[in-house]
Image (cartoon, coloured by chain):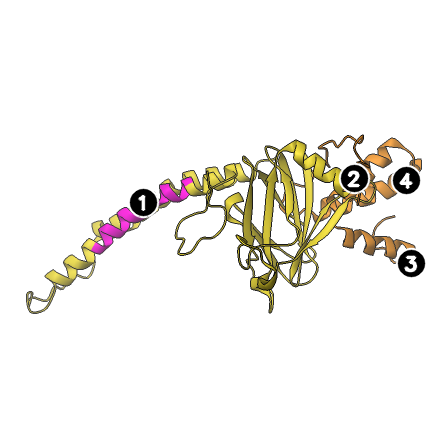
Chain colours: A yellow, B orange
Amino acid sequence: MIRNDAPVRWGMGFQDPATPVAEGIIRLHHELMYVIITIMVMVTYLMLRIIYNYDYRRNREVRKERSGALIEAIWTLTPTVILMIIAVPSFALLYAIEEEVSPGVTVKIIGHQWYWSYEYSDYGEEGISYDSYMIGEEDLEEGDLRLLEVDNRLVLPIKTHIRLLLTSSDVIHSWAVPSLGVKCDTVPGRLSQVSVYIKREGVYYGQCSELCGMNHAYMPIVVEGVKVEGYKEWIKSKI
Amino acid sequence: MAEDGENDGMEIKLETAPHDPRFQTTNQAKHCWSRYIEYHACVKQKGEEDSECQKFKRWYKSLCPNEWLENWDEQRASGTFPGPV
């Protein structure tokens, strides 16, 4: 099965979710769409009716109402109630994302102008650290994605709670991978924590999402989700 | 980086610094700082070989970016470290 874990030409929808957070975001979007489309249809109908009925050629009588307590109460309370209804699934997702779990893996992600570096310090005396640069067009191979491939991917185990700690060594960047439902600003001096639980194997693509200078568009992110045993083998080969 | 087969016998455990209820917010910079301070305070009190000190060491290494640690180690060596150790 081919999954949409990277941008596609004319892609309008979400990429396929690989984490519970991404699934939750998509579900919330669908729930909100019911409300949004209902409101849009209603407002459009009202506007068209007003434009048609109150055209001066059809309606020469000037109405002199200045206030209407009931209508004003209705058009104040109705949006309030709608917002309260929307808040329920929205806050549920927000708190679910922030739930505390004890992670099995910690990876530090540092933004630089214009590349990412990854540090796995749970293993060995020195840990593992490496930089991840975009592969230029001239070095791409058949089937590679332009402006998205990198030389060294971030390798993470699936079905494991992972803590990502993000910061920057210079300006503000943002580490974003849509399939994982992650977007987090990397701020110098700050160490922002994000939790990820990847449900399936795959290769997930993202791009820097905070303007950070000349090559902001050329510092992509590639995460490779592998089985736990494969992750352990990869760690052993690196330390 | 390991040569082929060099680390075959080594067992990799998926263990890392645990969640600390003292630091509930998204910004974990203070968590990293606290673990670093706790390690050096522990070493001062009990010595580097103590198991609890080694635990703090693993935790601060897991949490803190290498650049921050290098910076703090240099500051401690030069006597300009702003922390309580």
The reply to whether dot 1 and dot 2 touch (C-beta < 8 Å) is no
Q: Which residue is mark 3?
A: B78
Badge number at residue B4: 2
Callout 2 amino acid:
Asp
**Numbered disc in front, either 1 or 2:** 2
Q: Is residue A178 placed above or below A10 in the rendered structure?
A: above
Callout 4 amino acid:
Val
Q: Residue A171's image quarter? A: bottom right
Mark-to-mark CA distance, 1 and 4: 59 Å
> Can residue A34 be seen from the camera position used here?
yes
Mark-to-mark CA distance, 3 and 1: 61 Å
Give left or right: position of B57 versus A11.
right
The residue lying at 82 percent from left, 40 percent from top is: B57
**Numbered disc in front, either 4 or 2:** 2
Asked whether A48 or B62 is in front, the reply is: B62
x, y percent for residue A144: 54, 54
Badge 1 marks a residue whose secondary structure is helix
Callout 3 amino acid:
Ser
**Numbered disc in front, either 2 or 3:** 2
Chain of residue at mark 4: B
Badge number at residue B43: 4
Q: Are marks 3 and 4 on the same chain?
A: yes
Mark-to-mark CA distance, 2 and 3: 41 Å
Q: Which residue is mark 1?
A: A35
Of the two numbered discs 2 and 3 on the same chain, state the one appearing first in sequence: 2
